[in-house]
Amino acid sequence: MDGIVFFVVAMIVLGWAIILAVAINFTRKKRLGVLKRSHFLIAGVFLSSAILFLPIYRDIFGLNSITFKTVLLSIHNAIRLFVVDADFETISGFIQTLGGAYAKAYEITFAVLFVLAPALTATFLLSFLGDFSSYAKCFFSFHKEAYVFSDLNERSLALAKDIIKNKKGVLIIFTDVLTSNDESNDLVENARELGAVLFKKSIAHVHFNAQLKRKKITFFAISEKEDENVSHSSALIKKYGNLANRELYLFSMTKQSELFLENIDNFYKMKVRRVNESSSLVNRYLYDNGKDIFNGTHAEEDGLKVISAVVLGMGSYGTQMAKALPWFCQLPGYRFKLNVFDKDEHAESRFKALCPDYLNPKCNKVYVDGEAQYDINVHSGIDFKTHEFGEELQKIKDASFVFVALGTDEDNIGYAVQARMYFERIGVHPKIVAVVYDGEKVKQIKNATCATDKKNRKYDIEYTGTLQELYSVNVIINSELEDRAVDVHMGYFSNGDETLTPEQLKEKIAKHMRSFYMIEYNYNSSCASAMHNKVRVECKIAGADKDPADLTKEEKDLMEKIEHRRWNAYTRSCGYVWSNSKTSDSRNDLAKMHHNLVPFEELSKEDKEKDAKVTYKKKQQ
């Protein structure tokens, strides 16, 4: 009866395999999918089967111990289980020599293994054939431009749908897809309706060169886990970085991803761009709708029009808007005020840590000609559910623009309505914009009216940041803002181009294009300039619609002064402070200290000339 020892050991092995296969669902390894879980089960079934065969073949050969021969035959028969070729007669003969409950347990266990082993074989083959089929689809789509996503989620699906809508005859590929996961069934069905190719492997382990070597491939590292996006991007750059027809979009808002981008070796030809979703939302809104912020303002006694902005919530979107508005609103003829509200008691201190000079008494609420001018107040520890919030909000009697970004769609909609109520009580009707992610909700409430109001007044609330708006071709891939930002960036390096050979010019352009995409400051700063250039034209600032070469002296002086005011505020929004010296040697980008954070008249002639370059270009029309 020492065979019971083999039975117990086999059950322990099988039990541990089942426990590990189940436990993987509750770990970060879940994304590895069914194939990974089946590995545990296959190993468990194989080992437990081989162990159960050991006493059978020992008795058949009349041996007193386990020999090499019995081990080999046990392994052989365990393998036969998986290919539906095992002989149950040998097993039943052994069971007849046993007695009682032990015989019954052995019989039931082998019956289960005879069914489970072939089922696992089928699972493995289906999984293998699934990716094989996907490779085949890629092979026969070699003539198509491909867009490859690292994950199948709401964001990637929305972008894929818009790509297909705007670009005909393209191949959409999703990787790391769990087709058997109940939670993702709707996403998988939607992806299949698009005709997308689905891989179970991660984007880092699928090989695309053989299938799509000559066509352009655009990769999107767009998982919900930002650290995973960085690791996937690193793997993709190593595999395809030397190919000029490869592009990579890294979706991440972390400092790690920014540093990763700036650390990429210069010899790579692949275009790599980081997508910061909070910046993307704010930039897109200001670029498309910025002129509206300057409308509806009222003039004070000195003739200046007042832009009085309110930001509710200092999460990623609210903070980004609070940082952007002070530089975006630097135009002659306007005075800018900003009130920011947040429930965090340390909100003001947190904002000061991000942008020290925004709240520095030497800069804030100080009006010097040729210097950024703003009046910023941060209201910390404000509970939006309290009466005190309403009282504080109604003190802003000149409010003209309200941006609501409190975290959830429900909160943003609710407090946008609340803000409208409070301002209506004091006879003020500011433009109110709320961030709402769910596009269906926007459709349902966009034209809502006050149900109890006999005059049928509308709430007049605008919504931005829907999934369909943010994850679209025009925002992510073919951005008009980005095209204008490239013009701004390249304008700084155009001197001396006429003396270069075509090859030298091509090399110079490639170098500066790389610095545009790879260095975060260059990209964001150029986008900010392009956004401001557009609103200058829309607000009909004298000379704003002219090419730099066509400016009169008065217009050139005005453009330079406007640009420096904007640049000062923008640089402070990035956390820079004055270096306490006007010499360029005092600039320290690690310390975020800059020598040019001074009024316009204190700049050198050379630095003043730089500001004139950042203006409208006719080819952008």
Image (cartoon, grey):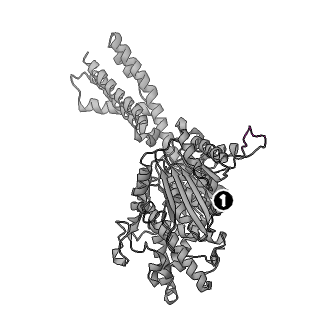
Is 452 contained in the magenta span?
yes
Q: Can residue 317 be seen by looking at this rendering?
A: no
**Residue that sits furthest to the front in the current view:** 301
Q: Position of residue 156 (x, y in %)?
A: 56, 51
Compared across the picture, whether 58 is left or right of 104 comes to left
In the depicted view, which residue is nearer to us: 156 or 148? 156
User: In x, y percent, where is residue 165?
Assistant: 67, 56
Q: Residue at 56% x, 81% y: name it.
A: 557
| Residue numbers of the magenta segment | 448-454
Secondary structure beneath label 1: helix
- What residue sits right under mark 1 in the picture? 166
Q: Residue furthest left?
A: 64
Q: Nearer the viewer, residue 168 or 550?
A: 550
- Above or below residue 532? Residue 426 is above
Q: Amino acid at mark 1?
A: Asn
Residue sitting at 61 percent across and 46 percent down?
419
Residue at point 31%, 21% (across, down)? 7
- Name the dominant secondary structure of the magenta segment: loop
* Residue closer to the observer: 164 or 180: 164
State which quarter of the image contains the N terminus: top left
